[in-house]
Image: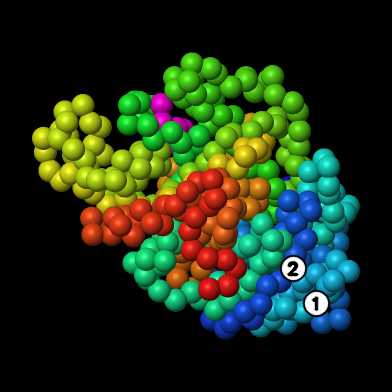
């Protein structure tokens, strides 16, 4: 297998293990205190200590594997070292031990095509020599508080969906997808599912007076903490342009009219065209298989049912049932709405971009075609828990964060007063809590 294809499999299509078919580690790795990290490149950079060797590492929730750079041209090897994750000290050096990983499987290989591996955008790049992926975190809750440049490695978070919704969390059940087999150096290797997939509505507008085709553009993202900007496939951007023309009468610029730009992922540079989209809504998977709805339809349902059940007006577009039929209320999954004052940075890339193609291949047919990769700039307002032991993601808005609103799962009419209290005011932010509960 050529090195380029191998890198895509490792960094964009799945992890591997020579010794076992699962990366799950049950031991708790961290402590309850914040770990200061470097986010100047858009990627989360930490330190990684293997014995007496310290490395600059990318902490990436999209990667299912942990890699240490063994140099260009090296033969890949796998072992199970004792690793320490290092946070920033007061001087900004990644030197403070903050978590211990007890023998995770580590692939020793060169993780990029260049002599020296870097991550970042044109304005800010930095070298790295290790990648910390989901297999090292499988026994933990990874809490991202990127608005304050910190993360936490915590034991799994208590409370089921109902309890977390009561405290205004958005709960995303079973978000980690992927898995399969791959071949490296002639050995067939199984890999596990650690890709965090999120249904998304681009530029949601849940106005009941509009047609559903004017209420936003449906998309599916895989979240990554190895880049700042969000990658969006050209086909999804063209759907967004068409929807915006219907909704507003004004079409966003053609891709060719957008300025050229690029971003460097752990596996290499990706080129495209830069733009902004005013808002995203991240939508949990439907909790009613008998009533599947698209992400933008779920956002509309969450807003429509917030004040009351559907009325009997024959012109009402009730997401629960046709006019005159029952029920007039139906469960709606959690939604996190993000509308920062300056919008969300997007890099529009070709549909045949190898990273996207590799993700689509891995996640098919379990998931529809991936439309892009959600970057860290879209993760600044919410506090996000990647709760690996419970196979879920939790989101809440950091206090007083403009343009962030959490709409928890709304599955019972009796929950309406609590639901209305959770939604709060978009201008000041809402949702439960800060970095420590």
Mark 2 closeness class: few <14, some 14–19, many ≥20 residues within 10 Å: many
Quick check: marks 1 and 2 in contact, CB under 8 Å? Answer: yes
Q: How is the image coloured?
A: rainbow
SS for tag 1?
A: strand
Please name the residue shown 83% across and 72% down the image. Answer: 89
Q: Viewer-nearest of labels 1 and 2?
A: 2
> Which residue sits furthest top?
249
Q: Secondary structure at mark 2?
A: strand
Q: In the image, residue 416 lies at what x, y percent?
A: 29, 55
Task: Kindly indicate the quadrant of the structure image that contains residue 145.
Answer: bottom right
User: Residue visible at 58% across and 22% down?
Assistant: 252
Q: Is residue 88 left or right of residue 392?
A: right
Q: Which residue is mark 2?
A: 36
Whether residue 220 is visible:
no
Q: Residue at x 73, y 35 (%)?
A: 271
Tag 1: Cα neighbours inside 10 Å, few (<14), some, or many (≥20)? Answer: some
Q: Would residue 312 appear left or right of 91 to someone viewing this image?
A: left
Judging depth in this view, the residue of 381 and 78 nearest the camera is 381
Q: In which quadrant of the rendered view does residue 132 lie?
A: bottom right
> Does residue 435 appear in the picture of this structure?
yes
Q: What span is colored magenta in the figure?
A: 214-218
Q: Tag on residue 33?
A: none
Q: Does the stretch in magenta take in 252?
A: no
Answer left or right for 161 relative to 318.
right
Name the quadrant containing residue 310: top left
Establish if 26 lies above or below 7: below
Q: Earlier in the sequence, mark 1 or mark 2?
A: 2
Question: What residue is shown at x 44% (from left), y 52% (from top)?
Answer: 424
- Residue to which mark 1 is pinned: 96
């Amino acid at each position: 297998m050529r090195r380029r294809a191998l890198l895509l499999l490792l960094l964009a299509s799945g992890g591997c293990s020579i010794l076992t078919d699962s990366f799950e580690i049950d031991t708790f790795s961290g402590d309850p205190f914040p770990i200061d990290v470097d986010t100047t490149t858009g990627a989360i950079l930490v330190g990684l200590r293997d014995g007496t060797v310290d490395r600059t590492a990318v902490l990436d929730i999209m990667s299912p594997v942990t890699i240490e750079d063994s140099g260009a041209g090296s033969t890949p090897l796998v072992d199970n070292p004792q690793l320490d994750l290092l946070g920033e000290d007061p001087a900004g050096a990644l030197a403070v031990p903050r978590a211990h990983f007890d023998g995770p499987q580590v692939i020793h290989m060169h993780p990029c095509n260049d002599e020296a591996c870097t991550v970042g955008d044109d304005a800010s790049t930095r070298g790295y020599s290790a990648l910390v992926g989901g297999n090292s975190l499988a026994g933990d809750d990874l809490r991202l508080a990127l608005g304050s440049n910190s993360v936490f490695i915590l034991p799994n978070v208590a409370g089921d969906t109902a309890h977390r919704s009561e405290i205004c969390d958005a709960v995303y059940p079973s978000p980690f997808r992927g898995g399969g087999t791959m071949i490296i150096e002639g050995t067939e290797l199984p890999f596990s599912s650690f890709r965090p997939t999120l249904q998304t509505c681009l530029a949601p507008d849940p106005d009941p007076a509009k047609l559903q085709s004017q209420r936003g553009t449906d998309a599916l993202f895989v979240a990554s903490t190895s880049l700042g900007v969000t990658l969006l496939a050209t086909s999804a951007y063209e759907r967004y342009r068409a929807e915006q023309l219907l909704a507003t009468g004004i079409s966003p610029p053609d891709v060719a009219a957008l300025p050229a730009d690029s971003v460097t992922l752990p596996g290499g540079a990706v080129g495209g065209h830069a733009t902004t989209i005013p808002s995203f809504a991240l939508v949990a998977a439907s909790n009613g298989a008998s009533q599947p709805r698209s992400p933008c339809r779920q956002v509309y349902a969450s807003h429509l049912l917030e004040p009351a059940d559907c009325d009997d007006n024959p012109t009402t577009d009730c997401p629960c049932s046709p006019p005159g039929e029952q029920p007039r209320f139906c469960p709606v999954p959690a939604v996190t709405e993000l509308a920062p004052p300056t919008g969300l940075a997007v890099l529009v890339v070709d549909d045949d971009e190898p990273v996207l193609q590799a993700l689509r291949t891995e996640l098919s047919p379990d998931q529809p075609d991936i439309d892009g990769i959600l970057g860290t700039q879209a993760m600044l307002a919410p506090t996000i828990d990647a709760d690996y032991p419970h196979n879920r993601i939790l989101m809440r808005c950091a206090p007083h964060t403009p343009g962030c609103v959490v709409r928890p799962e709304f599955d019972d009419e009796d929950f309406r007063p609590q639901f209305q209290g959770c939604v709060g005011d978009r201008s000041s932010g809402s949702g439960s809590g800060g970095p420590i509960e």
